[in-house]
Image: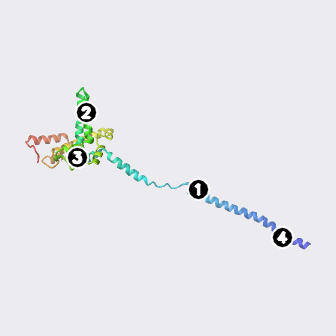
Amino acid sequence: REGSQGQAYPAIFSNSLLLVEQPALGSMESADLKQLAAEREARAKKRTSSPKPMPNPWASSASGSSKSRTAPHSGTDLAKAHRSIRMAHSIGLLWGLLGLVFLLLLSNYWWGLCIIFAGVVLARAGGQALHSVLPAMLQEGAAPTPTEMESGLLTGLFCLQGIMAPSSSLALEWTTLLENLAFGCTYGKRNCLTGDMYAGELTLGKICGLVYGKLSSGIIRCN
C-alpha cells in the first residue's frame, strides 16, 4: 500500500503541473495574438493617417480652357483684328463723337442718341458690311469671317470689358483710328507718303501735315 501510494503522489503532482502550465501557455498565446493585432492596427493607421492626394487630371485642362475663353476678351486684340473690323471701329468712334456733339448742341437729344447708337452698331457688327463697300485699294484680303466678327465684338471700347477700362480702351481706339487714317492716305501700299508717314510715331498732326504738304505742292495722287 505504501508503494502504491508513493507512486500515486508523483502522478497527481505531474497532473497538477500540467494543469498549471496549460493556462500559462494559453495566456501567453493570447498575449501574443493581442500584440500582433495591435501591431497590425498601428500599421493600418499609418497607412490611412496621411493618404496621398488623388491626382486631378482636370486642373490643367480647366486652366487651359479658361485661358482660351479669356484670351479673345483682351482689348488689345483690336490691333490684330481684320482691317475692315478696325475701320468699322474707327468710323463708329467718329459717329459716337459726332453724336456727343449733337447732344451738347441740340435741345432734341433724339438725333444725338441715334447717331451714337448707329456708331456702336457699326463698330460691333459692321465689319463685313463695311468691307463690301470699301474701295479695293482699302481692302485687305477677303471679308472678315464669322469667327473674326465674333472676336471683334469683345475688343476695343464697344464692349463691356472696354467700358470697364474707358481710358485705355479709348486710347486704343484712337491709336487704331490714326493707323487706319494713315493706311487710307497711303492707299494701303508704298507710295510717296509711306516712308515719311510710318517713320516714328503716328500723330494726327503728322498725318494732316504730310497730306497737306503733298496737296499744296500739286500732288493729287501719290504713286
Q: Which residue is mark 1?
A: 45
Whole-Å distance between the Cαs marked 1 and 3? 67 Å
* Image spot of residue 12 (x, y percent): 84, 68
Decide which of tag 4 and tag 1 comes sooner along the chain: 4
Q: Is residue 172 visible?
A: no
Whole-Å distance between the Cαs marked 4 and 2? 124 Å
The mark closer to the camera, 2 or 1, is 2
Decide which of tag 3 and tag 2 comes sooner along the chain: 3
Q: Which residue is mark 3?
A: 83
* Image spot of residue 102 (x, y percent): 23, 30
Disc 2 marks a residue whose amino acid type is Cys
Mark 1–mark 3 contact, CB under 8 Å? no
Mark 4–mark 1 contact, CB under 8 Å? no
- Element carrying mark 3: helix
Q: Which mark is residue 3?
A: none
Neighbours of disc 4 within 10 Å: few (<14), some (14-19), many (20+): few
Disc 3 marks a residue whose amino acid type is Arg
